[in-house]
Image (cartoon, rainbow, N blue to C red):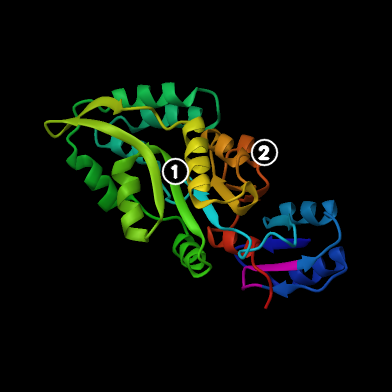
Amino acid sequence: MRLVVQGQRLLPAQITHLARLTGGRARLLSAQACYFDVAAPLPQAAAWCEENHLDCACVPDALTLDSIRLVVMDMDSTLIAIECIDEIADMLGLKPQVAAITESAMRGEIEFAESLRRRVALLAGLDESALQRVYDERLRLNPGAEFMLAELKKHRIKTLLVSGGFTFFTDRLKARLGLDHACANTLEIVNGKLTGKVLGRIVDAQGKADALNRVRTELGLSKDQVIAIGDGANDLKMMTVAGASIAYHAKPVVRTQATFALSHVGLEGVIHLFSRHK
């Protein structure tokens, strides 16, 4: 297996120390990432990495970019740096109230569908032009997102953006970034204004898992060929039905249940996890 270590920057002294801990030679992937061939997980190396604000993961040798055929990712706070519904609420001066509900749902304290209904209800009467303003003025990709997506395309890995957020944003990101599939909730808009309701079945935790399984089946893939990336409790079910999962700058409840965790690097870290030295 590979012990993959990543940070904002890997110092030579850090690499040397890790080589002593692992008894192996570092194989550099970039200025931010390297790996060591190891026979088993090394708790002492993991503890040292944690103390030094480095991400550390033991990755099976068979799990590489060549073995992955589908990457499924959450949108808010995973692919992008904002929670869209919080920014929409800010247009009404209601961001603190909505953000508090969002945070509670992300920690798994409130059932997601109920939390979404409560938040969307607060948006009733907002002009739909506010959605475009959020997209144009506030939506930003998380660091490393474009690199990650370019590498996935290079390896012919399909992508699915699945969100408890809204199709207004997922559809635009799908077109802009060349994603293969997208699934999210649809806001009801009448006469140019949000009604405070969501149309159809809410894409909650089970909805995300169902979307992953649906696309996986359509592509004729096995579970082991699928990776899921998320940050909140609403992502746990879809992460469970993937072959491996990545907690990206995630809540503790997600980090403890994911296969891997990235807490100190950007989305380029997804690629480094599954890369091999040439």
Residue 111, percent from left and from top = 49, 22
- In terms of image quadrants, where is residue 28? bottom right
Which quadrant would the N terminus be assigned to in this image? bottom right
The residue stretch that appears in magenta: 29-35
Q: Is residue 206 left or right of residue 131?
A: right
Q: Amino acid at mark 1?
A: Val
Asked whether residue 12 is in view, the answer is: no
Image point (51%, 49%), residue name: 72
Residue 84, percent from left and from top = 35, 41
Q: Which residue is mark 1?
A: 162
Question: Is residue 30 shown in magenta?
Answer: yes
Q: Which residue is mark 2?
A: 257
Q: Is residue 82 left or right of residue 226?
A: left
Asked whether residue 223 is in view, the answer is: yes
Which quadrant would the C terminus be assigned to in this image? bottom right
The extreme bottom residue here reads: 278
Helix, strand or loop at disc 1?
A: strand
- In terms of image quadrants, where is residue 199? top left
Q: Nearer the viewer, residue 265 or 184?
A: 184
